[in-house]
Amino acid sequence: MVRFSAPGVTASNASKVTGITANFGDVSIDQTTGDMTFKPYTSSATNVLSAEIIAAQHDYKFEISYKVDNNIHQLDGSVLPLYNGESNIPAIRFSKVSQDGTLLSAEDQARPANASDWSCVTDKSSDLMWQAPQANGIYAFNETYYWGDRSINHRESSEASCVLDGHCNTDNLVAKANEQRLCGKSDWRLATRTEWQTLLDKKLFDEDSRLSPINNFYFPYVDSNFDEAYWTNSFTIYTSGHDNNSADDDWQGSNALVGDAHVMWMSDDFDRENMSPRSTNDPRFTMLVNGSVIPDKKDNDVPVRDTELPPQDVAVDVDENLHWPSRFVKHGNSGQALADQDTANWTCTSDLAYRTVLANTQILWQRISKAAPLQNYTQAVEYAKQVNKSAICGQTNWRLPTENELKSLLVNTPFSYMPGMVFPSQRASYITSVLDDTNVGDNSYYWTSIADAYKPETKQIAVAFQDSFSESSGIENTELHHVRLISTTRLQP
């Protein structure tokens, strides 16, 4: 509510104030002090719309009229949505931001779309910045996109339509927003379902008026897409892609790499947990977001198992790097298998070698930088926590691998010192192809989650990635070594 001194009203004549009317909300006079109180979130019993909708429809601009001793007084002002901030103190929730990143003035914050212009909206309650759909241009409300890096429409859908130079997909839209530094930011991305739910509100939804569950004062063009779907970053992993009739080179719904992604409906269904995902080749609307990731809560972790994952056998005269696609798949930022498997840019890698022994399980390996700083064991554990906060590849279950898991990335190749003398040897593998981020060399160790059996308090097992005779050893926790994380996730049936 807003409390203020009203013109012509004092403690001595408060009882004489009559004929109070307001364009929305409720107005009262404190008979002791003469102060006027305006409560915007109060609606009449005859109005079926929620108080939040009514306030937004009036652009939060109130107009009050009243009489004092037959003198008519009129006043107006603006009230903007608040939230309970630090120490439970109310603070302005939404702020409008121009395309260059400038915060709009207090006057423009209170003006509607036809009197002001903004490209983004910050939400202090979630510390996120949202791209606000526009009337036209790259970020127009009616632009549609395929999900991720997809570029061909589903056979039962219309084609995506946008004004981007490249394919109409969300990867290209994200890249464009970051290249332009939209609203001064270069970390734009698709929102998680949880992030969408911080913004959407059922009290703002009205089916009869075709009002979406979003504040249309700050996002004025979204109602044009009432009951339509917006992409989230949540990719759903299926054992055989979009459907059970997998067909090679078919990018119209049945290829194993198509998959589905969750959407957020501009209806009161937005918070339904069991809402089915949609094919990534379907054209949908989108809104980008930036800020610290609020990850989705998932229940698809596969616990660590003792199942033996023996390294692959590779003959001396065979280069496994020529055949990496038969074992590995490259994945994008949200965990999707990329359409272009020859790309030089990917975020994580799935290993298909153990699908028979780890049924219904996806093994994902983090793609890392060879120049990443070395870490001691405690730092490595903390690093995994930070990676999970970023939900890399859509996963929040990243962890240090076991010795067994990490050694599965080695290969068995016989080593010969001289003719007739052959010794069994394990070595780093795929180091010129899909695992080209591996540091290979004498004592090039990577941390595992397994404590040393002899000194578990001070040593941890690490695996050496060498060009021959790679092996694991108990390493002092204080030593600095490499880190590559693993995620084991249950596939959808």
Image: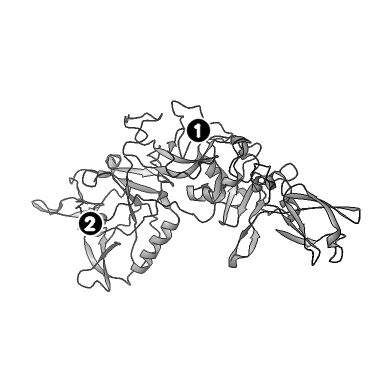
Q: Quadrant of residue 439?
A: bottom left
Q: Which residues are magenta?
A: 303-310
Q: Residue furthest right?
A: 70
Q: Is residue 102 left or right of residue 150?
A: right
Residue 192: tell me if it is visible: no
- Identify whether 493 is placed above or below 158: below
Instruction: Identify the residue at image location x=39%, y=30%.
Output: 253
Of residues 98 and 469, the one nearer the viewer is: 98
Image check: 447 left or right of 131? left
For the residues carrying marks 2 and 1, which lies nearer the camera in this image? 1
Assign the C terminus to one quadrant of the image.
top left
Kindly check if marks 2 and 1 are in contact, taking CB atoms under 8 A apart as contact.
no
Instruction: Identify the image's colour scheme: rainbow, by chain, secondary structure or one colour.
Output: one colour
Numbered circles on residues, count: 2
Task: Identify the secondary structure beneath mark 1.
Answer: loop
Q: Is residue 256 something that shows in the picture?
A: yes
Give the percent coordinates (x, y) of residue 464.
26, 61
Give the quadrant of the N terminus: bottom right
Residue indicated by mark 2: 404
Q: Residue 300 in the image: state x and y as whole percent.
A: 34, 49
Q: Is 125 inside the magenta-drawn segment?
A: no
Element marked by disc 2: helix
Classed neighbour count for the residue bearing mark 1: other residues with Cα under 10 Å, few (<14), some (14–19), many (≥20): many
According to the picture, the residue beneath numbered tag 1 turns out to be 283
User: Callout 2: few (<14), some (14-19), or many (20+) C-alpha neighbours within 10 Å?
Assistant: some
Q: Is residue 225 above or below residue 314?
A: above
Tell me the tag on residue 19: none
Q: Earlier in the sequence, mark 2 or mark 1?
A: 1
Camera-nearest residue between 304 and 470: 304
Q: Amino acid type of disc 1?
A: Pro
Amino acid marked by disc 2: Asn
Residue in view at x 41 percent, y 49 percent = 393
